[in-house]
Amino acid sequence: SAPRRGARVAAVWGTPLRADGFVAVTSDQQRTHEAATGPASPNINGAAASTAADARLVDPPALRDALRRWYATHQRALPWRATGDPYAVWVSEVMLQQTRVATAEPYFRRWMARFPDIASLAAAPEPDVLKAWQGLGYYSRARNLLRAACAVVERHGGRLPSRYDDLLALPGIGAYTAGAVASIAFGARVPAVDGNARRVLGRVLALEDDADRGGGARAVLAAAASLADGPAPGDVNQAVMELGATICLPKRPVCPRCPIAPWCVARATGDPAAYPPRRRRAQPRLERAIAWFVSDAAGRLLIAHRAPNGLLGGLWEFPLTEAAAGIAIPDDGAAGPYGDDGAGEAAGIDIGVDVAAFIPPTHVDLVDRPEPFGPPIAHTFSHIALTMIPVRLVVHDPFVPTASVTRYDEWRWVERAAVEALPLSTLMRRLLERLDGGSPT
């Protein structure tokens, strides 16, 4: 938990507290500290841990200048920073949401080669867009990029608007993305607050409130706005985020290398990692599903298309159905039905609950006995911990699945070689590896 409100710690300066509870700093101590960390604001001595109601930055202009100087010499060389193209900035900002820089960089290069401008993206079929995004996850980002590109062509003549409010009106663009694109690409004096920026500014303020919501979020946004209200707002916004990504780390901030350490009230408390207080992340919901490897006599595979909205929307996969509550999950690849209750006499795995979830009644008797296909596969989404039970099933007569599996809006029987051309999730690729004889963990 964060230190109590109003804590004043002298450890940074190596000097005792004054009678009023603030740090007394001599001129020699100030010069020694500046030599190690850069110029300090003289007002930091009177600062303390704060609630959202009284959180204020000390000397924003000096803080802004320190950030700009540091960013000019320490920013990472990234492909989207080498161009002034607003479209490239927009694509990079969307990719970097929920995705690490090292992962996003090769995707960005491939994306820009495939869709070099807004017009080419707007003209692309959605399956092509999802295929280019394949493996990045959070596929709604790709669908929203396509929707927004079409809107830009329709409303703005194919040119990304420069005004924050116009950007915010585009599909899938929220306050952060609008602020980042407006400030970085167009020089608008608006803030851009991502998770890294919230942490950095929450520590500079020694914020005792949750920086992600309520008054804490408003205090961080106000601090970011005061920094962006000056020269080179795009560089300032990027500097704050870069600082959070490389120095002001969640658990072990590298304060001796921080260019704004003299302004950081959390550092002065002696425990900067305690600020801002972090919410306890909810544990992912546990779910079990059967992954069906269904093939016909010709060797074609049955695949299903996820409805556009929701988890993995617009992607293709082997059918997944909820595992019946009574099915035991084996820990090896032993053949035979799951469970010991004799439910598999006709088709192996509780046919009334599982196979009948997508096989029409007219075809239930035309399938071979479902068999386990190797050990379960664990796959974790941000909010779901999924255990998949792979099952292989051969049908003698291809069928059109029932409509009871509402997550799917289209079904196809396809050759194995044709599957790779479709947009697939990481989950599907892991199942394909199992089908092809691999052993994904």
Image: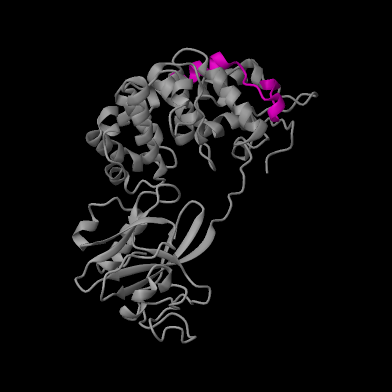
Left/right placement of residue 18 relative to residue 99 reads right
Which residue reaches farthest front?
A: 362
Give the position of the N terminus as an image quadrant.
top right
Where 350 falls versus 269 (above or below)? below
Where 371 falls versus 320 (above or below)? below
Residue 117 covered by magenta stretch: no
Please indicate, yes or no, whether residue 269 appears anywhere in the rendered image.
no
Residue 436 locus on image (x, y percent): 24, 67
Give the position of the C terminus as an image quadrant.
bottom left
Left/right placement of residue 386 relative to residue 414 reads right
Please indicate, yes or no, whether residue 237 appears anywhere in the rendered image.
yes
Residue positioned 39% across, 67% down in the render:
358
Residue positioned 29% across, 25% down in the render:
82
Taking depth in this image into account, of 284 and 122 the one nearest to the observer is: 122
| Quarter of image, res 289 | bottom left
Residue 293 locus on image (x, y percent): 32, 69
Q: Which contiguous range is marked in magenta? A: 45-68
Taking depth in this image into account, of 128 and 242 the one nearest to the observer is: 128
The type of colouring in the image is: one colour
| Quarter of image, res 153 | top left
Residue positioned 62% across, 44% down in the render:
279
